[in-house]
Amino acid sequence: MTEVRVRFPPSPTGYLHIGGARTALLNWLWARKNNGKLILRIEDTDAERSTRESIEGIIDGLTWLGLDWDEGPYFQTEFAGEHVAAAEKLLASGHAYKCFCTREELERKREQALAEKRDVRYDGTCRNLSPEEIRAREEQGVPYVIRFRVPHRQGVVAYEDKVLGRIERSYDDIEDFVIVRSNGRPLYLLCNVVDDIRDRITHIIRGQDHMSNTTRQVLLYEALGAKTPVFAHMPLTLDLQKRKISKRSHGEIVSVQFYRERGFLPWALCNFLALLGWNPGTDQEIFSRQEMIEAFTLERISKVNSVFNYRKGDPKFFTDPKLISMNAHYLRTMDIGELGELVQKDLEQQGIWNRAWEKEERDWYLATLDLIRDRFHTLRDFATLGRAYFADDYTVEQKPLKKNILKHPELKKWLPQLADLFSRLDNFSKEETERVTRELAAELDIKPGILINGMRTVLTGQLAGPGMFDILVALGRDRVVRRLRDIDRFYPEQ
Ligand code: GLU
């Protein structure tokens, strides 16, 4: 059996965006499923728009996502000689010809055709020039492009798309397209095919936006005497307004880097991206890498466009809510040691890391993550919403401040009283702290909730969170007592 060989061939003209990442992911899945190879090819032929920075960004992004490749990165520009040689081969075999029509001439004919409501395709003026006519023009130095000679056959060019079924286009519909510009540079359409032939690509999995090229490329494979690979065209990803997701209209929200910086887990993003355009045929949404590799088939790539549910300007929907909830799922369920490593990096960056949490207090650190992770959605939440567990400079949210603190000025007396009781406990446990809290409430003849909510706000800055007495134990007696005694800071000075 021939080895399955797929490729991810980004044009390095910007950051790695989620559409590109999805393409890379589906190719990766197919390679891994078939014990095949994934080739990374940087299509840098457009020298003006390609940048070093973009190449690095793409490589970093793929690496972060865990989408490893087996060959490359190859650079398309390194094979420029082969692209020219292929064009020459097509000329020599009569599959292509030199076209000396000037731009003005073509433009004039185009306008005329439009005015007469005729087809605007190239009319084949240079298709059958004699060798003498060609030589004469060359001697005069008339610039030329090279056009592919589309066979004048009856019927259709067809290929079997793994997703969409049989795709046909009538020969009559395809004009003699340009494969080499007048400056001698081969067009992308040709380079892409030459590279895929050289890289022995068996499957081309790419967006439907490339379909307009495919039938012409099928003709090129045929003319170059190569076997046409299997095509699988993926649906596009649209936003809620049905606009194609793109760097230009959506900005950073569609860049992989955006998710990395905001504390998304690489596999959570992959899991989400896979389902934007593929469905397993069951209700299952959460897949491990191995499960997804096993479940993935080209036939289950969707035919219809998928929607990236992003609502501009709404902080709760700063990205697709499904992605947020998937990320939360992975945060909640992932190996705690692994989570510990990731959060550590973030706390270090925030300058609130304590070396003791690497050794003697590692157990405390991991238990605390485990306690608070239930409500979090991204890795960043540990250093922000969960900051009170790791540092004293946490912010207190307005809503609980008003509701739980400012509304009850007596807490200025009560919480320090509670702090005294805590400081005298033999055992600063969940049970003991709860017991004295309830006893004090009874003595003061108030609902325990007033003390508990007040404490939660003072100690964590948050309206909600884990069980209050678990929080006390996680924070430890010293911090609890100190913060409760310092409650005055919340009230405006009188
Ligand atoms: N370089 C093209 C792109 O970035 C890929 C073309 C292809 O997959 O054939 O869209």
Image (cartoon, rainbow, N blue to C red):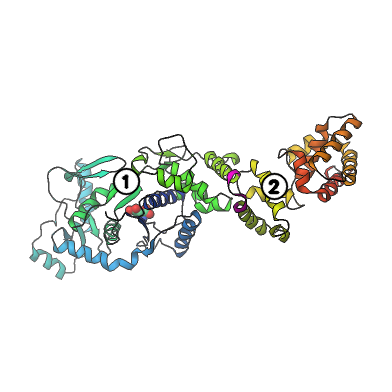
Figure quadrant of the C terminus: top right
As helix, strand or loop, the secondary structure at mark 1 comes to strand
Q: Magenta stretch: dominant SS?
A: helix
Q: Amino acid at mark 2?
A: Gly
Give the residue displayed 16% in from the left and 44% down from the top: 172
Foreground residue among 186 and 156:
156
Left or right of 3, for residue 448? right
How packed mark 2 is, by other alpha carbons closer than 10 Å (few <14, some 14-19, many 20 or more), is many
Give the residue displayed 58% in from the left and 44% down from the top: 333
- Callout 2–callout 1 Cβ contact below 8 Å: no
Q: Is residue 245 magenta?
A: no
Of the image marks 2 and 1, the number of the one nearer the N terminus: 1
Give the residue displayed 52% in from the left and 39% down from the top: 322
Q: Is residue 334 magenta?
A: yes
The alpha-carbon separation of the residues under discs 2 and 1 comes to 45 Å
Q: Give the residue number, with chain letter if any, for mark 2.
A: 386
Left or right of 394, for residue 53? left
Confirm whether residue 245 shows in the render: no
Q: Is residue 242 above or below residue 252?
A: above
Q: Amino acid at mark 1?
A: Ala
Q: In the rendering, at what x and y percent does residue 98 appear?
A: 17, 61
Confirm whether residue 289 shows in the render: yes
Q: In the rendering, at what x and y percent does residue 418 appear?
A: 88, 41
Q: How many badges with numbers are in the image?
A: 2
Q: In the rendering, at what x and y percent does residue 124 appear?
A: 15, 53
Foreground residue among 45 and 453:
453
How packed mark 1 is, by other alpha carbons closer than 10 Å (few <14, some 14-19, many 20 or more), is many
Q: Give the residue number, with chain letter if any, for mark 1.
A: 232
Magenta stretch bounds:
332-338
